[in-house]
Image (cartoon, helix red, strand yellow):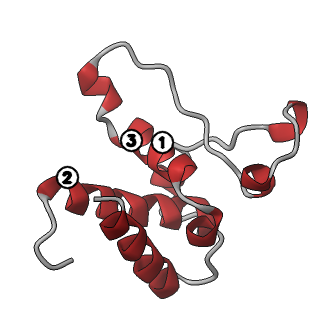
Amino acid sequence: MGCASLEDRRRYFVGLQVYRAVSLRRPHCISEMFQRWDTGMAPRTRSSSLPQLTVPDSSSEVRRRSFSIMGARLWNDLPLAVRNTESLPQFRRRLRTYLTSCR
């Protein structure tokens, strides 16, 4: 990741873990932290063609920085081109490109 800030590195590694949990369903103990948001009641949009994750309620800053909340928010904010990736190596490249372009 070159000279990325600590926050960028954190987002990158959280993104990798969420991809593994959501797309590969492993490890099981982490994949069960994330619940897919039921889009059946919402209007169909381009961003809803892939599952969004439910972001749990949080009342404290510490809770908002937890893996389950930060991971769900990061996943939901990713463009479809990044989320809709076939393989982990391809996801790594796209995620790195996306995060460096957001600086």
Q: Amino acid at mark 3?
A: Met
Q: Which mark is residue 7?
A: 2
Q: Are marks 3 and 1 in contact (CB under 8 Å)?
A: yes
Residue for point 51% across, 27% down: 56
Q: Where's residue 21, x and y in %? A: 52, 60
Residue for point 42% across, 78% down: 92
Say if 57 sits above or below 8 in the image.
above
Q: Identify residue for label 3.
A: 70
Q: Where's residue 51, x and y in %? A: 71, 52
Mark 1 lies on a secondary structure that is helix
Looking at the rendering, in which quadrant would you find the N terminus?
bottom left
Q: Residues within 10 Å of mark 3 (few under 14, many from 20)?
A: some
Q: Identify residue for label 1.
A: 73
Q: Nearer the viewer, mark 2 or mark 3?
A: 2
Mark 2 lies on a secondary structure that is helix
Earlier in the chain: of badge 2 and badge 1, it is 2
Q: Are marks 2 and 1 in contact (CB under 8 Å)?
A: no
